[in-house]
Amino acid sequence: MSRKWSFHHHDETRIRVLSSQLGVSPLLAQVLIARGFVSADQARTFLETRLTDLHEPSLLPGVSDAADRIVAAVRAQRRITIYGDYDVDGVTATSLLWHCLRLCGAVTDYYIPCRMEEGYGLNQAALRQLHEEDPQRLVVTVDCGIASVSEAQVARSLGLELIITDHHHMGPELPDATVLVHPRLPGTDYPYGDLCGVGVALKLAWAICQRFGDGKRATPRMREFLKSAVGLAAIGTVADVVPLTGENRIIVRYGLASLRETSSTGLKALFQVAGLQGKSVLKSEDIGFSLAPRINAAGRLGQARLAVELLTTENPERAVALAAYLDELNKNRKQVERRILRQAREMVAASPGWLDHKTLVLAHHEWHPGVIGIVASRVAEEFCRPSVLISLRDDGTGQGSGRSWAGFNLYNGLAACQPFLLGFGGHQAAAGLSLQASQVDAVRTALANYAELHFHPTPDDTELRIDAEVMLSEVTVRAVHELDRLGPFGQLNSMPRFVASKVELAEPPKTMGEGDRHLSVRFRQNRTTLRAVAFGRAEWAAELQSAAAPLSVSFAPVINAFGGFERVELQLIDWKHATTG
């Protein structure tokens, strides 16, 4: 389906007024207006947001009670176990709280479940094991637990004190834990509900540090810790793809600076293997494409505990070894992804009738369950269909992961398949499932039947919102640096998107990168020529080569600082024949 481009109305008078009031270029003023900033004060607040704009931790539901209990446990020298999740959000949250508790003099350790053997979140066997080892310990979850009703009941029956901190969707029944900490607890009204797990952990650590200070302000040493902790929080916030608005944007904005200035031993080693050591300015894309995948690879391939060790170790040699290992895991993960994607394409090509359905369900015995979710996103985008990939096991069962497309409610779709599933969970955009291998065909049919009745995508569902139409000559290094004030960029705060019309190829397009997956092309408009890159869009090379000029191209401009020389580069989002609009 060709994407519909939606342009914001160009109001020359409003642009000129806002540009003058803020002292910014008309281009930045136009983007601000396109994004809903109607007054200079509103725009100025957004552009000049401060770390002190974060809400006091005491406002977060449950955090005061949790901090009091944790401080009491620290002073009583009871063991405190941090129970985290295996993704980047959970790993950074675990590491952040561990650093905080160690600074406070606590006896503390952490527990990260194995993705393949234990699955997501709290599990009863782990709680029983922790209780057996030390019945007096306090267990604090991060980034998990809010749906663990039966597990909390087990902890209660054992007499195990359990504090749950989480941000995920809550079911109809809340777990009976000692304390629940969650930005959206029923009956509460926290000003910003989109914190991720590490954001909640940051607020809890802040509240703990206050209690070791004068009750309101942490000690100078703990204030320095909190500044560095914002860096860890930034990594988890970007990786969890939560909205980069409000508090999340503040955390990432100041966390990026913190990572550059006060990184731990482990993070410095991770920067080295990720090729970020020499960068003077970090951006959210550096987290999303360089740091987070390496941390995530550990959890996806069953070694999440090693990622926490990397982020908590003070041993330089151990940090270097762990960073190198995570880097190798990430390379393996990318190879596995490419193989699964190739096999998925081959399966669709061998069964073209599946494309008569509005959804795709694919299954294979060789697919790694920790990686199929990433590939499901690629399959959904490539085939323009909500897609579910299933890893079949030797015991006759399968574990699946699905991703939506064009607003399809994947959770509701899987609910319609419930008679054929062992279990499922998730939300509209992403979901997981388990089933007997013999039920794959039944699930494929049931999901397709549900979509046929309830899924009617239109161009509006994949609409590409454009901030402004520009000439390539306007996209200068100075202009892009000024546009960076809108960042950091991510979910619900995307990089500025522009369109340039009547452009032509300056040279034949080329593929590049591992497996020739990416596209490199140079566009020319009048006397201006700029390089553009489209990640994962190698198939556009032949299409562009055969396309008749002129073209219209949609892009996000970035700065390429390779070799110390700055130049503008375009991240190509979409393109059309100029005559098609």
Image (spheres, helix red, strand yellow):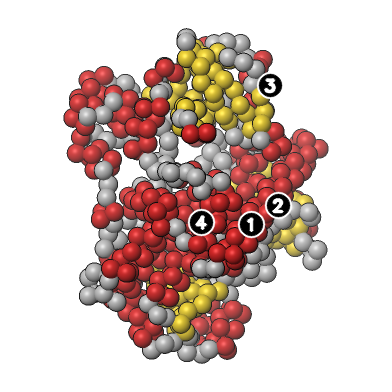
Q: Is residue 157 visible?
A: yes
Residue of label 1: 324
Which secondary structure lies at badge 1?
helix
Label 1, label 3: how far apart the Cα atoms are: 37 Å
Label 3, label 2: how far apart the Cα atoms are: 29 Å
Residue of label 4: 268
Specify the amino acid type for callout 2: Asn
Q: Kindly indicate the quadrant of the structure image that contains residue 173.
A: bottom left
Residue 307 vertical position relative to residue 50 in the rendered view, above or below: below
In the image: residue 268, left or right of residue 17: right
Q: Kindly indicate the quadrant of the structure image that contains residue 206.
A: bottom left
Q: Out of 336 and 383, give the one closest to the viewer.
A: 336
Which secondary structure lies at badge 4?
helix
User: Going from the N terminus, do you reach mark 3 or mark 2 first?
Assistant: 2
Residue of label 3: 542
Q: Do the residues bearing badges 3 and 2 touch, measured as CB atoms within 8 Å?
A: no
Residue at image position (56%, 51%) is 272
User: Going from the N terminus, do you reach mark 4 or mark 3 first?
Assistant: 4
In the image: residue 470, left or right of residue 368: left
Q: Out of 7 and 547, give the one closest to the viewer.
A: 547
Residue 144 percent location from the top left of the image: 49, 67
Residue of label 2: 332
Are there few (<14), some (14-19), or many (20+) residues within 10 Å of tag 3? few
